[in-house]
Image: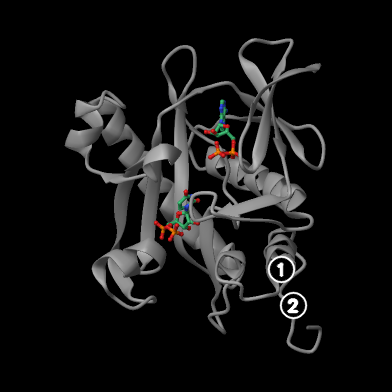
């Protein structure tokens, strides 16, 4: 597969054309941003971890009946994916209160919900990704009702699969962001990435944060947290206190 011109450079990934117009290559960077680009830095090795973890999650989800953009991994930072028209929505599922939910509604982090919550933001950096509801998304022409219903079903299925999976790794899945896209024939598939950049992951035993909040909140041990998640996914078990 030939890597051709760069189509896009985002905050965390670059997207390249290939000799097949239906396929693109995503190339994961170590660059990290938070608070809509206000805070910038690098997390050494993050690109490799996010690439490998995303591909692992996409394959697991495909096995569980969720269609994704994944085609095949090309190198430690590059993956071949189906080119999609991204639906400009950030689809967020929460199992436990944290982050902007806690801030917006004035509640502590760590409230375990009886059922997952589903929310949408308009993916628009200039506007700061504002929260919106289905009516707003339809009014803005971002998606149809049928597409929104399908996206909700898929997102909740992803949550069920991922919660079960992370539980086996001794990790609590707090919340996460998904992006969906439409292939040339109009099929909706899960796209973008699933990584510690886009999920909140807490150690089940200690509650320790093993995700991008370590970077956002200057908690230290950022690289180690990403490595710990990678290690558990790769089946090498948990790092014991003695090893730390
Ligand atoms: P951002 O644009 O938010 O800075 P990234 O740095 O992750 O984000 O850039 C990757 C871009 O590629 C995002 O805009 C994402 O929506 C887009 N993207 C993800 N998967 C696909 C795909 N399969 N086809 C086309 N674009 C994609
Ligand atoms: N998230 C993301 N990209 C965004 C906003 C949120 O990947 O632009 C993820 C974030 O990592 C968390 C979940 O979505 O796992 C919910 O994030 P929240 O709305 O609490 O926003 P935050 O306060 O993290 O910006």
In the picture provided, is 63 more to the left or to the right than 105?
Answer: right
User: Vertically, is 187 above or below 89?
Assistant: above
Q: Quadrant of ligand 1?
A: top right
Q: Which residue is mark 1?
A: 228
Q: Residue 102 placed where, x, y %? A: 33, 69
- The disc placed on residue 239 is 2
Q: Nearer the viewer, residue 95 or 18?
A: 18
Q: Residue 105 placed where, x, y %? A: 25, 67
User: Vertically, is 221 above or below 63?
Assistant: below
Q: Quadrant of the C terminus?
A: bottom right
- The disc placed on residue 148 is none
Q: Quadrant of the N terminus?
A: top right
The reply to whether discs 2 and 1 touch (Cβ–Cβ < 8 Å) is: yes
Q: Earlier in the sequence, mark 2 or mark 1?
A: 1
Q: Secondary structure at mark 2?
A: loop
Residue 145 in sight in this render: no
Q: Residue 223 placed where, x, y %? A: 74, 65
Residue at (21%, 37%) from the top-left corner? 134
Residue at (68%, 56%) from the top-left corner? 41
Q: Nearer the viewer, residue 184 or 161?
A: 184
């Amino acid at each position: 597969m030939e890597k051709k011109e760069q189509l896009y450079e985002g905050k965390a990934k670059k997207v390249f054309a290939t000799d097949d117009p239906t396929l693109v290559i995503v190339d994961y960077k170590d660059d990290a941003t938070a608070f809509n680009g206000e805070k910038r830095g690098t997390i050494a090795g993050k690109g490799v971890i996010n690439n490998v973890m995303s591909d692992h999650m996409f394959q697991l989800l495909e096995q569980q009946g969720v269609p994704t953009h994944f085609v095949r991994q090309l190198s430690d930072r590059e993956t071949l994916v189906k080119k999609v028209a991204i639906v400009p929505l950030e689809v967020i599922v929460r199992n436990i209160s944290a982050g902007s939910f806690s801030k917006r509604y004035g509640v502590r982090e760590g409230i375990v919900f009886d059922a997952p919550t589903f929310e949408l933001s308009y993916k628009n950096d200039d506007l700061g990704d504002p929260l919106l509801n289905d009516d707003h998304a339809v009014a803005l022409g971002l998606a149809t009702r049928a597409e929104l219903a399908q996206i909700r079903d898929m997102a909740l299925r992803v949550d069920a699969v991922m919660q079960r999976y992370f539980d086996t790794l001794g990790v609590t899945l707090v919340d996460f962001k998904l992006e969906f896209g439409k292939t040339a024939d109009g099929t909706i598939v899960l796209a973008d990435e699933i990584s510690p950049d886009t999920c909140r992951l807490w150690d089940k035993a200690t509650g320790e944060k093993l995700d991008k909040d370590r970077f956002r909140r200057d908690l230290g041990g950022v690289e180690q947290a990403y490595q710990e998640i990678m290690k558990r996914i790769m089946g090498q078990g948990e790092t014991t206190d003695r090893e730390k």
